[in-house]
Amino acid sequence: MFEKKEPIVLEKRIQNFPLELICHQFSIFRRWSVRRRLMLFFTSLILLLTLLQYLCIYWVNQYYNEQDFILRLREKAILETQLFLEDSIQAHQNHIIQKRYQSFTYDETICIFNTEGSVYYSGTNTCTALSKKVIEKIKQYKEVVQKSNNGKVSLWILYNNGASDYITLISAYNRYAEEQDAFFRKVLILGFIISVFLVIAIGFVLTHIALRPFEHIVEQMNAISVTNLNLRLAEYHEEDEIGRLAKSFNKFLDRLEEAFNMQKAFVNNVSHELRTPLTKIIGEADIALSRERTPEEYRRVIQAQLKEAEKLQKITNHLLLLAQIGSHRQSFLDEEIRVDFLIQQAIEDVRREQPQADVLFEFTPPSDGTSITILTNYNLFNIMLKNIIENACKFSDFQQVSVQLFSQDNKVTIAIKDKGIGIPESEIAHIFEPFYRGKNVEKRKGSGIGMYLVKNIVQLHEGEIKIESVENKGTTVYLSFATIYSRPKLE
């Protein structure tokens, strides 16, 4: 019975991609379509960037307002100090100063202190003497700014009128900045809300445009079935990702169609190859049973049937072997065997089955006494070598066939050379197709499955096979395999 196997899913996840991380953390996202995931990622990213931009704008605006307010407080503190201590400022100048600064402050307090901390001038009755710690700090930094929790800004500056030093304190609320901040917050919130709707709408349109070519590909793929494998996807843009996807799928369809056609040809050829010997066996039996015959005639009929049955058995064994190789590839290669031993055994088997075969084995063992060993399966390797050597003998009319073995750089090569009819250059590429037989060998016996089996065995060993041939001069088959190691022979 055939063993049912689960399909193998080839999956490669990009773990550092935020969208993949989100989708795999929350099961609900795994059920979403790609369109929804792209919409989520696009809108989230753009809105996050927009929010960060708005926050930066708001912070910069607030910082600018604070610095501008401190600058204005400094200017007013200096002017008020000059107005009180110096006579150079006239009454109309005082009026201009008051008019210039009265609109941007609220609950303003101005105090002037001497360097001892005593109040020298107070615009209100709230001024108190300064501590030594505060005085030292002001003298050190020349200017000190402090902002209370209720938003009131206080500025101390050290002022020198040419005769002595004074400390001026000015404190006030930034009424203009507070009103501007409130209005600016409303504008930013409204702008962010509008941005949300715009980003969602743009994201929907962009994802629709981006995924539309994939929808076309899906529609075209759904139209392809077993009856029309000749159809291909349209490749509109060959250089972008969609074009490469379509091209890759078309290449896959080429391989699939080729395999499907090969399967059909294989089934037809198998049917023909199995039907022919069966027909001959049945025909010989019908003829033999049509009337009474002599023992010699019955012997001839049985021999003919035996010959066809052996041919049928050989084809069946090869087909079964191919099926086993395809389903249990990794379990076959479990023996470490010397290559020269494998070749000698195959040559002996050929000579035993075909006494007229003339096969010469040429091999010079390494001078250091090491042996060339590969990981293989004795029966498979024997079948592979026997097929090639038998073909070389058969298609050279049993002229001498040479088998050479040599190794280099952990690689062993077997060369099987004959002086037979050769292979036309146009047919070499088809030699490994199942049941293929060249035009110049149609009159010679064979099933056309031997070289197909050889190729599968070589691929199982992850080796290489190469054929060089000149028509009417001969053919050389090269087999190359990797050696697992070379070790001293056992005495």
Image (cartoon, helix red, strand yellow):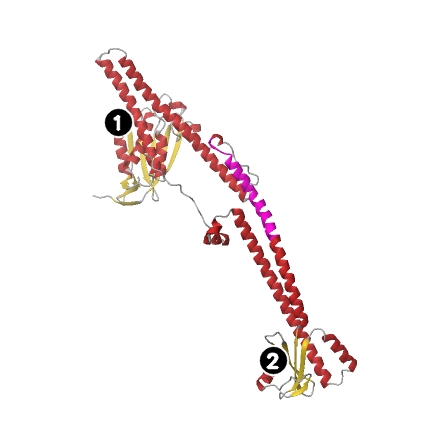
Pointer 2 residue: 141
Pointer 1 residue: 353
Q: Outermost residue, top direction?
A: 291
Tell me how far mark 2 sits from mark 1, CA to CA.
111 Å
- Residue 426, by quadrant, is top left
Which label sits in the foreground, 2 or 1? 2
Quarter holding the N terminus?
top left
Q: Is residue 108 above or below residue 486?
A: below
Within 10 angstroms of label 2, few (less than 14), some, or many (20 or more) residues? few
User: Which stretch appears magenta?
Assistant: 198-226
Q: Residue at x 70, y 78 (%)?
A: 76
Q: In this rendering, would 337 be left or right of 243?
A: left
**Nearest the eye: 155 or 275:** 155
Residue 23 makes an appearance in the image = yes
* Among numbered discs 2 and 1, the one appearing first in the sequence: 2
Q: Is residue 74 magenta?
A: no
**Nearest the eye: 153 or 464:** 153
Within 10 angstroms of label 1, few (less than 14), some, or many (20 or more) residues? few
What's the residue type where badge 2 is placed? Tyr
